[in-house]
Image: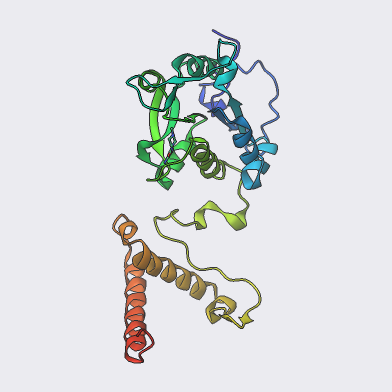
Amino acid sequence: MPAQAGIHWKHLDSGLCRNDGGKKDVRFSIHPWSRAMRIDVITLFPDFIESCARVGVVGRARERGLIEIATWNPRDFATDNYRSADDRCYGGGPGVVMMIDPLRKALDSVRRASGSEHGKAIYMSPQGARLDQAKVEAFAQRDHLILLCGRYEGVDERFIEHAVEEEISVGDYVLSGGELAAAIVIDAVGRLQDGVLHDAQSAQQDSFSDGLLDCPHYTRPEHHEWGDVPAVLASGDHAAIARWRMKQSLGRTWLRRPDLLEQVVLDKKQRALLDEFRREHEEKTTHDRDSGSGE
Ligand code: 4HQ
């Protein structure tokens, strides 16, 4: 068994981790029982991923050792003088495809470096299942992700068959490469790691954390040429504020993303708040029509 085997297991006290060489781990900063998540990215543009991984919440998490991100360039594993990682498409046409062997060698290096002997890649591709917050939360639970970014026409199908566990799409549009999609996964997954978010920006309060859109937010000044902050938010009445926010979340989800509303089960209180929102919305729109402001 290689010296690194088992080192990536997240739960040291689960008995799954055997071999960390008895070394004290500097990543034990917040929770001594959990290790940093590791994300390896196979990409022809490592600089792009590196610069994304330096920015904002995820950049700070990486500095603090809460997430580890490494990049691997298939060109570094090419065997010819041009360091080719792609070749012409069988069947003709203008495009090129990423070759199996440079990708395979890059993946072998990821496996050795991470101790994930049989780790497969997540391929960023419009042919994959759509990324959503449920998928992000499932990825965030894992201790290791290997993201594969394609360029050109994508990667040889045989690599997908043998070395890809899953294809993931960030949306129904065409990118010039998988790097932006991988950066989206890194950002969304990274911010959910233990210790990454402050209480004030807790993941609990976000859009989608309960399947609903977020409520509106305001800051100073309270009164402005462009409108006033809703009085309840400055009232100091925490119960009334929570009620207002829930009502706005429900109302906006109903107005803007009725598809999301079909996926959640509302409790009695939430149904009453949404009814209230709908009645007020109805009143407002009839009033606007009658007063002729909507043509
Ligand atoms: N591409 N979600 C084609 C995407 C994409 C997406 C990445 C373009 C892969 C070969 N990836 N390359 N949408 O449009 O993830």
Residue at 40% across, 28% down: 94
Image quadrant holding the N terminus, namely top right
Q: Nearer the viewer, residue 122 or 294?
A: 294
Is 230 above or below relative to 140? Answer: below
Residue that protrudes farthest toward the top in the picture: 1
- The mark total stands at 0
Q: Name the residue nearer the viewer: 81 or 246.
A: 81
The answer to whether 270 appears left or right of 78 in the picture is: left
Q: Say which quarter of the image contains residue 11.
A: top right
- Residue 230 lies, with reference to residue 260, above or below; the image says below
Task: Answer whether residue 64 is visible to the viewer in this image.
Answer: no
Residue 210 appears at what percent x and percent y? 42, 55
| Side of 129 relative to 220 (left or right) | left
**Picture layout, residue 242 above or below residue 70:** below
| Position in image of residue 148 (x %, y %) | 48, 28
* Ligand 1 picture quarter: top left
Relative to 205, residue 72 above or below: above
Which residue corresponds to the image point at 55% horizontal and 43% vertical from the top-left?
187
State the residue at coordinates (48%, 40%).
Answer: 181
Q: Is residue 233 visible?
A: yes
